[in-house]
Amino acid sequence: MSDQELTFDDGVFVFETVMRVRNAEIDVSQYLTLESMTALLAEARARFLYSKGIQAKSADHQGLMVDHLQLAIISQVRAREELLFEVGIEQLSDNDGQLAIKVTRMYDGSLVAKARKHFINYDYRLNKISTITSCIQEALSPQPFEI
C-alpha cells in the first residue's frame, strides 16, 4: 500500500471524545502500541455512532463495518496521557462512507495521529454488503445550522 498523506478539512469534525492511555496499552518501550491505538480509534468510532443513535447491529441484523483503515502515527504517546479524538464523516454515499479521525494531546494540542476509516453496511443475516439505510444516512449527514 502506498503512503498517502492524510489531510482533512477541519470543518468535517463534528464529535469529540477524550480517552486516557492506560498502562495496559503501552509496550516495553513505554509507548502506546499500534494495536492499542487501533482499539482507541475503534472506541472513538463507537462513541461517535452511539452519539448519532446508531446501534452496532440493528433489529434487522445490519450494521456498519469498517473494511479499510488508513492510519498515520505522527508522534508517540505515553501512559496516562489524555488524548482528544475528533471524529467526522468525510464522505457518505448509498453504499459506503469515510470516517475521519484526528487525535491530539489534551495538554498541548499537539498532533498524535490521523486516521481514515472506510465503512460499509453489512447484513449479518445474509452475510453480504447492503446499501446504507435511510435512517443511518440521515443520522450521519451533516445537519444544517439553524438561525
Image (spheres, helix red, strand yellow):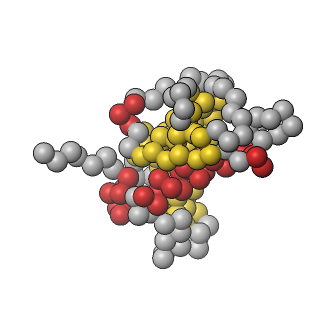
Please say whether residue 117 is visible from this viewpoint: yes
Query: Which residue sits furthest right?
Result: 28
Between 120 and 74, the one nearer to me in the picture: 74
Let me know if residue 132 appears in the view.
no
Q: Is residue 129 above or below residue 8?
A: below
The foreground one among 87 and 106 is 106
Res 113 → quadrant: top right
Q: Residue 6 in the image: x percent, y percent?
A: 54, 27
Q: Is residue 23 above or below residue 105?
A: below
Question: Residue 50: x percent and y percent?
Answer: 46, 61
Q: Looking at the image, which is closer to me, 137 or 43?
A: 43
Q: Position of residue 9 (x, y in %)?
A: 40, 29
Of all residues, the one furthest to the bottom in this rendering is: 59
Q: Nearer the viewer, residue 78 or 16?
A: 78
- Say whether residue 1 is left or right of residue 9: right
Q: Residue furthest left?
A: 147
Where is 100 relative to 1, above or below? Answer: below
At 49% across and 26% down in the image, what residue appears?
Answer: 7
Instruction: Determine whether, in the image, residue 30 is placed left or right of residue 59.
Output: right
Residue at the (48%, 76%) spot, across then down: 59
In the image, residue 112 sits, relative to residue 57, either above or below, namely above
Q: Quadrant of the N terminus?
A: top right
Number of on-image labels? 0
Question: Residue 121 location in percent, x, y?
Answer: 51, 58
Which residue lies at the image location 27% right of the left edge and 49% below the top edge? 143
Identify the residue at image location x=38%, y=52%: 140
